[in-house]
Image: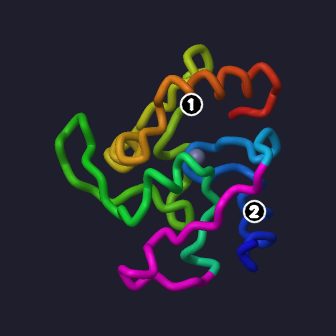
Amino acid sequence: MNPAYPFVSERAEHRCEYCHAPELVFNFPFEVEHIVPLRQGGATTEANLALACRSCNLRKGVQTTGVDPSSGAEVRLFDPRQDRWPDHFYADLDTGELIGLTTIGRATLAALRMNGEPQRAARRLWLRLGLFP
Ligand SMILES: [Zn+2]
């Protein structure tokens, strides 16, 4: 296990810092990811680490920017260390869809493909269990 996991997961309150998936309902610990990848000069420091579910981490990969589908603008992705989640995202409690409130939010939703049917179905279930948002 990543040695930073205990601190990073506690700081994140055991939620994916991108899609807010609750770690509690998964059968494997979430991943410690580098917000700025090592190969792009990112450091293994608390300020550059985030807790991410497998889906978000896999899709984020080494991306640090994405395209806002509304404007076509390429912008940086959501940064859990410098951005506040509710400033950029809103959860539709009926559909389980995450809505991007900003260019950064919309670009991050698109880049990490956070609104597929499996994710929306899981969020509806987590809502019924009181684990989301
Ligand atoms: Zn996630």
Q: Residue 107, labelled with which disc? A: none
Q: Using residue 54 as the reference point, say whether residue 116 is left or right of it.
A: left
Q: Residue 9, labelled with which disc? A: 2
Q: Which quadrant would the N terminus be assigned to in this image?
A: bottom right
Q: What residue is at 60 percent from the left and 83 percent from the top?
A: 45
Callout 2 amino acid: Ser
Q: What residue is at 25 percent from the left and 48 percent from the top?
A: 67
Q: Earlier in the sequence, mark 2 or mark 1?
A: 2
From the viewer's side, name the closer residue of 26 and 6.
26
Percent across and percent down for residue 78 are: 44, 56
Q: Using residue 108 as the reference point, say whether residue 92 is left or right of it.
A: right
Asked which quadrant contains residue 68, the reply is: top left
Question: How would you rate the neighbour count of disc 1 (Cα within 10 Å): few for under 14, some for 14-19, many for 20 or more?
Answer: some
> Does label 2 point to a residue whose CB lies under 8 Å from ligand 1?
no
Element type at mark 2:
helix
The magenta span reads 28-45
Q: What residue is at 33 percent from the left and 46 percent from the top?
A: 107
Callout 1 amino acid: Gln
Percent across and percent down for residue 130 are: 81, 27
Residue identifier under label 1: 119
> Does label 1 point to a residue whose CB lies under 8 Å from ligand 1?
no
Which colouring convention does the figure follow? rainbow
131 falls in the magenta region? no
As drawn, 16 above or below 95: below
As drawn, 117 above or below 17: above
Element type at mark 1:
helix
As drawn, 18 above or below 79: above
Choose mark 2 or mark 1, whichever is in front. 1
From the viewer's side, name the closer residue of 120 and 47.
120
